[in-house]
Amino acid sequence: MTTPGQSRTGPLDGVRVVELAGIGPGPFAAMLLADLGADVVRVDRPGGAGLGIDPAYDLTNRNKRSVLVDLKAADGPATVLDLVARADVLIEGYRPGVAERLGVGPDACLARNPRLVYGRMTGWGQDGPLAPSAGHDIGYLAVTGTLGMIGPDPEGPPTVPANLVGDYAGGSLYLVIGILAALRHAREHGEGQVVDAAIVDGSAHLATMIHGMLAAGGWQDRRGVNLLDGGCPFYGTYETSDGGYMAVGALEQRFYDEFARLLGLGETAAARADLARWPELRTAVATRFRTRTRAEWTAVFEGTDACVSPVLSLREAPAHPHLAARGTFVEHTGLVQPAPAPRFSATPGTVRTGPVLPGADTDEVARDWDVPALRPDGPHGDGPHPDVSRPGALRPDTLHPDDLHPDDAKEQQA
């Protein structure tokens, strides 16, 4: 059923999610659920999460609603538990034990709502020697072996893949998978549970195919010498005459033949089958690409099966003809952003609202979720809420910095 006052679309229409505010993979996971139609209420703390950007531009908070609750106030935990009683899912990204100390841990929440799916997002997980330690995406990737295999040069340092592989692929996506699986179980059996999504677990799991290749002798345990890690001269990137780059992924023979013909490799193309000649082939490919601009090579390979693409910047990508035709990027309230994914034929997701401002929906959520405690004059009321639309209007932070996982040297989650 659709939440009153909201016109929602997507396969998760009717699912209610409470997100305890943080930054990084937790909010992104909540955004994914919101993009799929869930009614996500973000519980922001007075003072903000410390992200350091204007909340009006934080796209991971699109399609959500926000309320302000001070979890360290006497009535804060009770207010959150009132929300939990009406929710299907809760997402938190605190260090292990913090939610329990605040009174909103799994035991308290499941006692209030036995069908609740309690999603926990951390870097190291809820147990193990490093569980209470600080950390960031790069460290989680490092210890799982995932970082060590990324990079084109076996003698050079690993390549840092932004925070996409750890935080969002190994973290957010695994949390969402776990939540959806647990939600199905809860609806069939009436039993909620805790989902422990650790970035180290997800990042290791992502490399399952590589571990299989390693065991079979088809992958060397060092970077820059394998088929898919930049070691292969026909699977990598090459600079063009204007300083741009082209990405080559001509792995199969028929695609390689087309690539070699259009690039003009001539007899050097035969070096594909001889590993000893790969350095020669790499030099020849690099030399050819430096003879034309990125735009010129894009035109050469356009419409072919050579598996060659221009390397675009973040600002260039939305204008790519294929992405534009599919609507891979959308503009909403003046902000260009990736559209919801994946796509559904019967229940499509949409960008319904822009980034939510902290506390902007407190009264609306109090009404729609029937939680009077959210209102200033409710049973747990503590006076007027600050005007979050005014800079500097939020009260000072009430959570100790070590409690959360924002992008800070003291914190566990990037």
Image (cartoon, grey):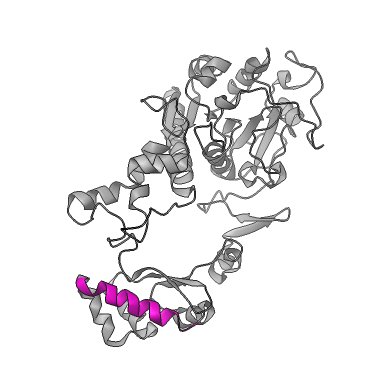
Residue 124 appears in the picture as rendered: yes
- Give percent across and percent down for residue 80: 63, 21
Can you say whether 346 is above or below 182 in the image? below
- Give percent across and percent down for residue 354: 69, 46
The secondary structure that most of the magenta stretch takes on is: helix
* Direction from residue 59 to residue 165 in the image, left or right: left
The part of the chain drawn in magenta is: 276-292
Residue at the farthest front position: 155
Can you say whether 21 is above or below 169 in the image? above
Instruction: Give whichever of 351, 43 is nearer the camera.
Output: 43
* Direction from residue 33 to residue 284 in the image, left or right: left
Instruction: Give whichever of 104, 408 is nearer the camera.
Output: 408
Residue positioned 56% across, 36% down in the render: 408
Asked whether residue 281 is drawn in magenta, I would say yes
- Give percent across and percent down for residue 58: 65, 45
Residue positioned 25% across, 48% down in the render: 211
Residue positioned 65% across, 39% down in the render: 64
Residue 1 appears in the picture as rendered: no
* Direction from residue 249 to residue 161 in the image, left or right: right
